[in-house]
Image: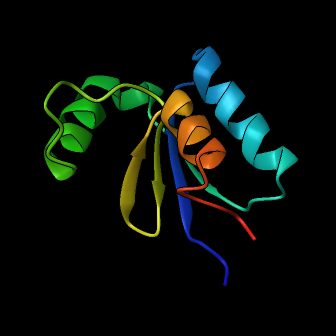
Amino acid sequence: MTKKVEIYTLDYCPYCMKAKMFLDEHNVEYTEIPCEDKEEAMRDKLTEIFNLKSPATFPQIVIDGVDIGGYSDLIEKYENKLINFD
């Protein structure tokens, strides 16, 4: 079953680039939502939508409507087999 993956990014963010590379290496199709033109508004919106305790950071990775978090959260959950892309 294909997962719906969205990634909210900033073009100058090294962790955004790493997250996209990881997804590409694992042949995961994703929708990228660039946020540099509206960074603060998107940070506020993501913080509110996902009920985060602190302001959202970038990237924010959403899989099937569930906020996974950022790059390190993605890697940790993948390595601990909490998410898979098969």
In the visual, does 5 lie left or right of 64? right
Q: Quadrant of the N terminus?
A: bottom right
Task: Where is residue 81? Give x, y as percent.
Answer: 61, 55
Front residue of this view, candidates 45 and 22: 22
Vertical side of 28 occupied by 20: above or below: above
Splitting the image into 4 quarters, where does residue 11 fall?
top right
Task: Give the residue displayed 60% in from the left and 21% down from the top.
Answer: 15
Extreme residue in the bottom direction: 1
Q: Quadrant of the C terminus?
A: bottom right
Task: Where is residue 61? Give x, y as percent.
Answer: 48, 46
Front residue of this view, candidates 76 and 3: 76
In the visual, does 35 lie left or right of 25? left
Task: Where is residue 2? Give x, y as percent.
Answer: 67, 78
Vertical side of 74 occupied by 4: above or below: below
Task: Where is residue 51? Give x, y as percent.
Answer: 14, 46
Splitting the image into 4 quarters, where does residue 18 fall?
top right
Vertical side of 15 occupied by 21: above or below: below
Task: Give the residue displayed 44% in from the left and 27% down from the top.
Answer: 58
| Label tally | 0
Front residue of this view, candidates 37 and 62: 62
Task: Give the residue displayed 75% in from the left and 39% down from the top.
Answer: 22
In the visual, does 42 lie left or right of 58? left
